[in-house]
Amino acid sequence: MTTDFSRQRLNGKIWQNQILSHYSFIEAQLIGCDFSNCDLQESNFQNAKLAQANLSNANMRGADFFSTDMRRVNLRGADLHGCDFQKADFTGTDLTDVNFDGAIVREALFSKCTGLTRETKHTLKAEGPISGFPIH
């Protein structure tokens, strides 16, 4: 059974250390939320607003972030293996020590990000253009 928070305003909510796998956050407003150390495997964040959220050290394997606002998000140490980030906006996001293995990032925007390495770029499934991809 999926817990559904779709289209809800949950800005600033603290979810630290929670098991939220298979939850639905479709089109939810999650600006500034704290999902640090959460289990978010297979959760759905399509078209959600996650700007300025803290997702550090979260396990998001297989989650769906299609067209999600990920601007200025803290993803430090997050496991994003197999996630769908098509058309997501990562502008200004911290990508230090992120596992992007097998993540799909077609048409995603990576402008002004920090912490992304050449090694990480090679693990991405672009299958199309990636904009503003910074390598530090």
Image (cartoon, helix red, strand yellow):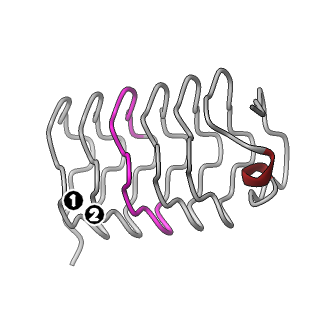
Magenta includes 120? no
Q: Where is residue 59 in the image (x, y as percent from the top left)?
A: 39, 63
Residue occupying image coordinates x 78% and y 53%: 119
In the foreground, 119 or 48: 119
In the foreground, 104 or 19: 19
- Residue 53 lies in quadrant: top left
Q: Residue furthest right?
A: 128
Question: Which amino acid, by three-letter code, is at mark 2?
Answer: Tyr
Disc 1/disc 2 C-alpha distance (Å): 6 Å
Query: Which quarter of the image is occupied by the C terminus?
Result: top right
Magenta includes 57? yes
- Report whether 16 appears left or right of 65: left
Disc 1 and disc 2 in contact, CB within 8 angstroms: yes
Q: Label 2, on which residue?
A: 23
Which region is colored magenta? 48-63
Q: Which residue lies furthest to the bottom in this view?
A: 1
- Report whether 125 appears left or right of 89: right
* Sequence order check, earlier mark of 1 and 2: 1
Nearer to us of marks 1 and 2 is: 2
Q: Label 1, on which residue?
A: 4
- Residue 82 lies in quadrant: bottom right
Majority SS type along the magenta span: loop
Question: Which amino acid, by three-letter code, is at mark 1?
Answer: Asp
Q: Position of residue 26 (x, y in %)?
A: 36, 49
Residue occupying image coordinates x 46% and y 44%: 76
Residues packed near mark 1 inside 10 Å, few (<14), some (14 to 19) or many (20 plus)? some
